[in-house]
Amino acid sequence: MGRREYDRKYVGRSPLPIRPVNGGMSTQAETWVGLPRRAKPLVRAGILLGLGLGGFFDGIVLHQILQWHHMVSARVAPTTVADLQLNVLADGLFHAATYVFTVLGVALLWRAWRRPSVPKSSRSLFGSTVLGWGIFNVVEGLVNHHLLGIHHVRPDGPGSVLLWDVAFLLWGVLFVVGGYALVRGDDALSPTTEERDARTVPDENR
């Protein structure tokens, strides 16, 4: 090949483009609900822990210590011994469900931290737990307070029943947004230099 042919073919060409590995998969596909996919096991464990802890707080503090309501007190007022027993039974079943969520969260957390690829981040664990607690409040508020109406946060005031129920929902939304923001802003979830280098290779076909 002569000098002129070589210059026409190669001189002035840009360096080889960089493309993602894994068959051209973009980094966008390596995310899960806007978070790095490798954080998924940790976040799932934290969400389950938050569901359980949020339920325990609701049942222990609101049902038992403050006694603002019981699980089905809007449908069956605990004014007799039999009706109170029914409400206590419903509270116990509710606590059993929150116990299951908590145990599952601990099991998933144990599995997640055994995997080398999962970041050992206390901030992400705390944030995802807050996120799970917020999800509990939102679901509990929408289903039990508004759709089914089996109980309300504080039916005997002060303030209206709706005010307390809406405040409970807003508390949940605040926890969802705040918990997600804590996880999303965690620097420990950012890919390392080695991971960024392994994600891209030169595209020699162009």
Image (spheres, rainbow, N blue to C red):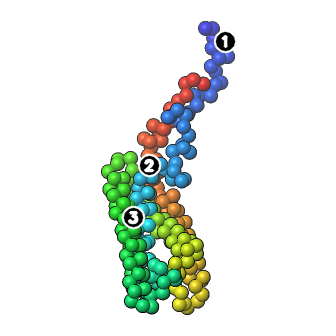
**Amino acid, disc 3:** Phe
Tell which tag, 2 or 1, sits nearer the viewer.
Answer: 2
Tell which tag, 2 or 3, sits nearer the viewer.
Answer: 3
Q: Is residue 200 visible?
A: yes
User: Residue at coordinates 60% horizontally, 25% vertically from top-left?
Assistant: 206
| In this picture, residue 28 sits left or right of residue 193 | right
Q: Quadrant of residue 1?
A: top right
Task: Estimate the x, y position of residue 49 in percent, counting from the top left.
Answer: 40, 64
| Viewer-nearest residue: 38 or 155 | 155
**Amino acid, disc 2:** Arg
To which residue does mark 1 refer?
Answer: 4
Mark drawn on residue 92: none
To which residue does mark 2 refer?
Answer: 38
Could you tell me how far apart the alpha carbons at marks 1 and 3 are, in whole angstroms? 72 Å
Q: Earlier in the sequence, mark 2 or mark 3?
A: 2
Could you tell me how far apart the alpha carbons at marks 2 and 1 are, in whole angstroms? 51 Å
In what element is the residue under mark 2? helix
**Amino acid, disc 1:** Arg
In what element is the residue under mark 1? helix
The vertical placement of 85 against 39, above or below, is below
Q: Earlier in the sequence, mark 2 or mark 1?
A: 1
The vertical placement of 38 against 175, above or below, is above
| Viewer-nearest residue: 18 or 22 | 22
Q: Residues within 10 Å of mark 2 (few under 14, many from 20)?
A: many
Task: Estimate the x, y position of residue 84 in percent, counting from the top left.
Answer: 41, 86
